[in-house]
Image (cartoon, rainbow, N blue to C red):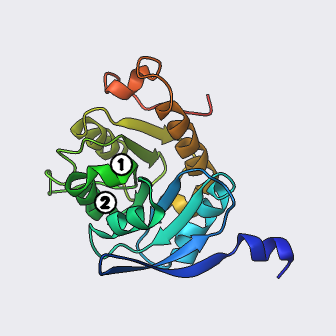
Amino acid sequence: MTPDESVRSAVPVTIEHTGRSVSALEWKTVSSGPTIVVAVEGDIAELAGPVAEKLMDNNRVIGVSLTSAWDPVTIAWWAADPIVLLAQGAPARLACKTAKLAPGALRALVLADYSPGQDSDASTGIVVPVLVFHGRDSSAETHTQAVRLHEDIPGSHLIELDGCVELPTKNCATALAESLTWYLDELGKPFMEFDQFNGASKEPVDPRA
């Protein structure tokens, strides 16, 4: 392993606060940017690692497998700041619950390759900023499902990109990282400048355009 590879590797951490404990991987950084928590189902290093390495130069990145909707809250307390929660696939259901139980813990919620299915209430009642990310070539979620999720969350933003497939944290890491970085930059602008954030447009945008 080269020195550069060693610096960019993930370090196992146990995050504890008020009696709760979360096992995670942390991608070390000297950045003062927001903490981004990448929640995946399966091997954290394999699934979260590719997008974490794209984001770590400007952010502190934590990879987790969520076991409770309170896990992100524990991490937010530990980070001493609201987090950006990026949840892919099944963990997005718990992430939506976090957004409703403790909205103050989240700076923003990013839902990737997620469809609530029959549980129509899973994504309703969310008041934090939400980005819905969808790859047009994904086999896990259709365009129709992505648009429906976007419409179910007032004020959400939809980014849908050609050439992206399922498991975007691993397979479309660059596109997902660029989209998330663009979105966070837009959130920092005055409200009227970020005109599509009000949910008036149902069409997806390409941040690379």
Q: Could you say which is closer to the camera, residue 36 or residue 143?
A: 36
Checking the image for residue 125, the label placed there is none
The residue wearing badge 2 is 95
Residue type at mark 2: give it. Answer: Ala
Q: Residue at x 40, y 61 (%)?
A: 76
Where on the picture, by quarter, is residue 118? bottom left
| Residue at 15% over, 57% down | 119
Tell me residue 72's x, y (percent): 36, 65
Mark 1 packing: few (<14 Cα in 10 Å), some, or many (20+)?
Answer: some
Q: Is residue 83 left or right of residue 5?
A: left
Tell me the crowding category of disc 2: few under 14, some 14 to 19, or many 20 or more residues within 10 angstroms, Cα based.
Answer: many
Does residue 50 appear in the picture of this structure? yes
| Rendering coords of residue 143 (x, y %) | 37, 42
Image position of 151 (left or right of 207): left
> In this rendering, is residue 127 above or below 138?
above
Q: Which residue is mark 1?
A: 142
SS category of the residue bearing label 2: helix
Amino acid type, callout 1? Thr
Q: Tell me the SS state at disc 1.
A: loop
Position of the N terminus by quadrant: bottom right
Q: x, y (%) of residue 86?
A: 44, 56
- Is the residue 126 above or below the residue 97 in the image? above
